[in-house]
Amino acid sequence: MFKSAEEREAERREREAEQARAQAARAEQAKVAEEQRKREAFMATPAGAATAAKEAGQPFFEIQLEVGAHTGSAGFGSAEGRRTTSSSATSLGEIEKLGWRLEHAGYYFMITGETSTARVLVSGDATAVSGVTVGVYLFRNTALPESAG
């Protein structure tokens, strides 16, 4: 009916041990979740995608990277635009360090929008186009023989 001081102390130690085990399990789960989040974030990068393709033994790897953009606007009878560029050289270098060799590169302009306005004192419209320039890069897996693929 009544527990001795030793029994109460043993129960208290057991509860504390159980709480410590639960806390350790939660910490381990958090660590695993953080590692998984970091891996998923890495896999979303060009080097991560190349790593996944390499691990899967793919003979080729293709990636599309935005290398420029143009934003056009039209209003009050005139059109103007602003162009930006970025280099994909760092990403391409990281991919080659993983054992891929760049085989082919191509580029295209993808229109993302356009605006137009009627010209003032002249017939017709002024149209401005917005879009992005995309580089398409094809790599070959250097770990596989040339005849693969």
Image (spheres, rainbow, N blue to C red):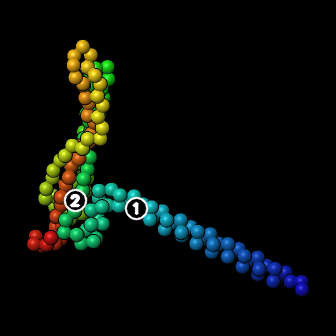
Could you classify mark 2 by the number of other residues whose Cα lies within 10 Å: few (under 14), some (14-19), or many (20 or more)?
some
Counting every numbered tag in the picture gives 2
Using the rendered view, name the quadrant where residue 113 is placed: top left
Q: Picture coordinates of residue 132 (x, y %)? A: 26, 42
Residue 59 visible in the shown view? yes
Residue farthest toward the top in the current orientation of the protein:
121
* Label 1 – label 2 distance at C-alpha: 19 Å
Task: Please give the label number shown on residue 115.
Answer: none
Residue bearing mark 2: 62
Q: Picture coordinates of residue 28 (x, y %)? A: 54, 70
Residue at position x 27%, y 71% from top?
56
Eye-nearest disc, 1 or 2: 2
Residue farthest toward the front in the current orientation of the protein:
123
Question: In the rendered image of this protein, does residue 107 appear above or below residue 22?
Answer: above
Residue farthest toward the right in the current orientation of the protein:
1
Q: Amino acid at mark 2?
A: Glu
Residue bearing mark 1: 40
Q: Picture coordinates of residue 60 (x, y %)? A: 19, 65
Q: Quadrant of the C terminus?
A: bottom left
Q: Nearer the viewer, residue 64 or 20?
A: 64
Residue at position x 22%, y 54% from top?
92
Question: In the rendered image of this protein, does residue 123 appear above or below residue 12?
Answer: above
Q: Picture coordinates of residue 4 (x, y %)? A: 86, 83
Q: Nearer the viewer, residue 74 or 137?
A: 74
Could you classify mark 1 by the number of other residues whose Cα lies within 10 Å: few (under 14), some (14-19), or many (20 or more)?
few
Q: Mark 1 or mark 2, which has the lower sequence index?
A: 1
Which SS class for mark 1? helix
Q: Amino acid at mark 1?
A: Glu
